[in-house]
Amino acid sequence: QEQPEDFVIATGVQYSVRQFVEMAAAQLGIKLRFEGTGVEEKGIVVSVTGHDAPGVKPGDVIIAVDPRYFRPAEVETLLGDPTKAHEKLGWKPEITLREMVSEMVANDLEAAKKHSLLKSHGYDVAIALES
């Protein structure tokens, strides 16, 4: 093509951060309740089933709002429109958000298990964490 074009690659379906967090937690057998509003909102563990989250127990706060990650020009809602990508490229989503979250959590869980195994055998393994 003569001129470059921008395309939005999206599902066209909107989800909240809370929905994303609930999906990810559910993959690990964690049920959450949310308390507070705005910057005071926190996700608190209600129950844990299975063996994928051994260090997590009811009452733990496992997610909280951090104003450091607010965007300077935040908009109220974001929703990608994939119409142009579909019409010009024939692109359409091949997996759902739930499937993508499942893949992401499975990958992170596998990495965490490897880290735990190495650490339990005396290896000093660096892990990137934000403070």
Image: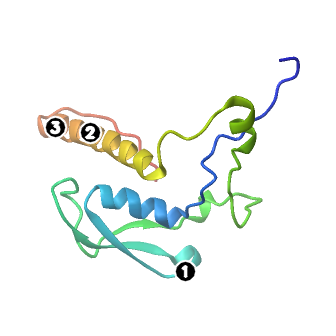
Do residues under tags 3 and 2 come within 8 Å of each other at their CB atoms? no
Give the foreground label among 3 and 1: 1
Depth check: give the residue in front, 108 or 89: 89
Secondary structure state at the residue bearing disc 2 = helix
What residue sits right under mark 1 in the picture? 37
Amino acid type at circle 3 is Leu
Who's the residue at 55% across and 41% down the image? 93
Who's the residue at 22% across and 41% down the image? 113
What residue sits right under mark 2 in the picture? 110
Residue 21 position by quadrant: bottom left
Residue 66 position by quadrant: bottom right
Amino acid type at circle 2 is Glu
What residue sits right under mark 3 in the picture? 117
Q: Position of residue 120 (x, y in %)?
A: 13, 40
Secondary structure state at the residue bearing disc 3 = helix
Who's the residue at 73% across and 61% down the image? 74
Dot 3 crowding, Cα within 10 Å, few <14, some 14–19, many 20+ = few
Secondary structure state at the residue bearing disc 1 = loop
Q: Position of residue 64 (x, y in %)?
A: 47, 68
Name the outermost residue toward the bottom: 36
Depth check: give the residue in front, 107 or 38: 107
Sequence-first disc among 3 and 2:
2
- Give the CA distance from mark 1 to mark 2: 33 Å
Give the foreground label among 3 and 2: 2
